[in-house]
Image: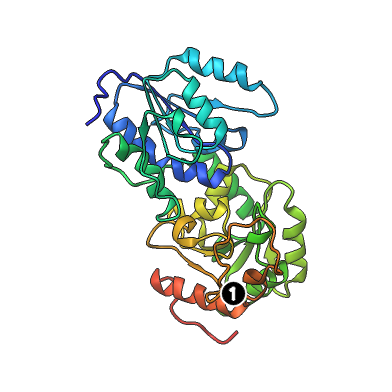
């Protein structure tokens, strides 16, 4: 057992993707339980700030802006804070160096190639073997910290709920069964086709008598508009939202169908039945969490889970995944959640 009695200041590091940062916050309640009086800070990038806001287990959010402050200046600022414990959940060369230069007595990380020097406590390297949630918790296990809470916190305020409620009222959607489709994805290889999303939206509307919301984020409005224009059934496009407002919208939905991206993880974290569409990423490692959620992919391809951001063989994992296959997966999702158990003819 590592003697952590002296720990008064803790820094958790997780950069990049919003969905990955969201999943990493599972460590925070467990840290707070073990260190009730410690200062716990979380270091991330600007896009993920909102994931952490209003989290009661955090004292401060430290933002690393690669376009702003230089590395040496930022590293120096981290060192001056005087952290006793730094937990690097990201583990790239920059965060390894950041951890090493922090001056912390305890430095936790994973033994990735070329990064062992930065840490004096090594977490078991099980990347590629288990879900990202468990991968994050392995850092706490390396410290001998008991895992007492497996809930991922995400706070949606009354203001966020009212923003979405006002939109629903204005659009005459009150009393409708809302379903969200999310066609976005940081890599094009993770995106199922817009035409297929349109066909799915039409089928869901006819089969289950729902109203389809076409989700979008920065730079994605045109894709949502294209899907709406391709559909023969009515669908609506929500207004621009913050991440918290998006959460409020997702909580109003019966279920969500999404590519592997942040809104998929957010919906699942909020307990909304979520179907993830997968190809180049592995649903066993990155799939939507919770018993209420599931995933679909085109099984039988040797290249599944390739993690390539560009496909040399024609994006077949998504191109060949049919609308019927996804619709069948939706039906199973609904039956599992006892939402709608009877599928009519499409």
Task: Kindly tell me whether residue 340 is visible in this rendering.
Answer: yes
Secondary-structure class at tag 1: helix
Classify residue 215 as left or right of residue 176: right
Residue at the limit of the structure toward the top, as seen here: 80
The residue at 57%/58% (across/down) is 260
Q: Position of residue 205 (x, y in %)?
A: 61, 74
Task: Kindly tell me whether residue 44 is visible in this rendering.
Answer: no
Q: Is residue 8 above or below residue 118?
A: above
Classify residue 312 as left or right of residue 137: right
Q: Position of residue 323 (x, y in %)?
A: 62, 77
Q: How many marks?
A: 1
The residue nearer to you, when weighing 217 against 93, is 93
Classify residue 83 as left or right of residue 305: left
Please tell me in which quadrant of the rendered image residue 333 appears. Answer: bottom left
The residue under label 1 is 204
Classify residue 302 as left or right of residue 132: right
The residue nearer to you, when weighing 100 against 299, is 100
Q: Quadrant of the C terminus?
A: bottom right
The residue nearer to you, when weighing 267 against 316, is 316
Q: Position of residue 155 (x, y in %)?
A: 46, 40
What colouring style does the render use?
A: rainbow
Q: Is residue 177 above or below residue 217?
A: below
Q: Is residue 141 above or below residue 308?
A: above
The residue at 53%/27% (across/down) is 97
Residue at the limit of the structure toward the bottom, as seen here: 345
The residue at 61%/67% (across/down) is 211
């Amino acid at each position: 057992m590592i003697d952590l009695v002296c720990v008064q200041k803790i820094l958790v590091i997780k950069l990049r993707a919003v969905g990955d940062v969201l999943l990493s916050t599972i460590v925070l309640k467990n840290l707070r339980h073990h260190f009730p009086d410690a200062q716990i800070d979380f270091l991330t990038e600007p896009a993920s700030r909102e994931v952490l806001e209003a989290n009661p287990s955090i004292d401060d959010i430290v933002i690393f802006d690669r376009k702003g402050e230089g590395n040496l200046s930022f590293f120096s600022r981290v060192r001056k804070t005087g952290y006793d414990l730094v937990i690097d959940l990201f583990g790239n060369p920059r965060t390894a160096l950041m951890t090493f230069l922090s001056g912390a007595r305890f430095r936790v990380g994973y033994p990735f190639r070329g990064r062992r020097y930065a840490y004096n406590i090594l977490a078991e390297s099980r990347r590629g073997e288990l879900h990202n949630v468990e991968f994050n918790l392995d850092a706490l296990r390396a410290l001998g910290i008991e895992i007492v809470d497996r809930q991922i916190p995400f706070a949606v305020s009354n203001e966020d709920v009212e923003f979405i409620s006002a939109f629903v009222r204005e659009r005459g959607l009150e009393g409708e069964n809302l379903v969200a489709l999310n066609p976005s994805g940081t890599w094009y290889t993770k995106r199922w086709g817009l035409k297929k999303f349109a066909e799915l939206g039409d089928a869901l509307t006819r089969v289950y008598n729902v109203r389809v919301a076409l989700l979008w984020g920065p730079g994605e409005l045109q894709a949502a508009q294209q899907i709406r224009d391709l559909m023969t059934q009515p669908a609506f496009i929500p207004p621009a939202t913050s991440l918290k407002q998006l959460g409020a919208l997702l909580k109003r939905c019966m279920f969500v169908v999404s590519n592997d991206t942040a809104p998929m993880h957010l919906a699942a974290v909020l307990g909304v039945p979520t179907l993830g569409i997968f190809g180049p990423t592995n649903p066993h490692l990155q799939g939507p969490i919770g018993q209420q959620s599931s995933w679909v992919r085109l099984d039988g391809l040797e290249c599944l889970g390739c993690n390539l951001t560009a496909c040399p063989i024609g994006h077949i994992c998504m191109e060949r995944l049919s609308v019927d296959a996804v619709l069948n997966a939706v039906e199973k999702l609904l039956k599992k959640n006892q939402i709608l158990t009877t599928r009519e003819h499409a």
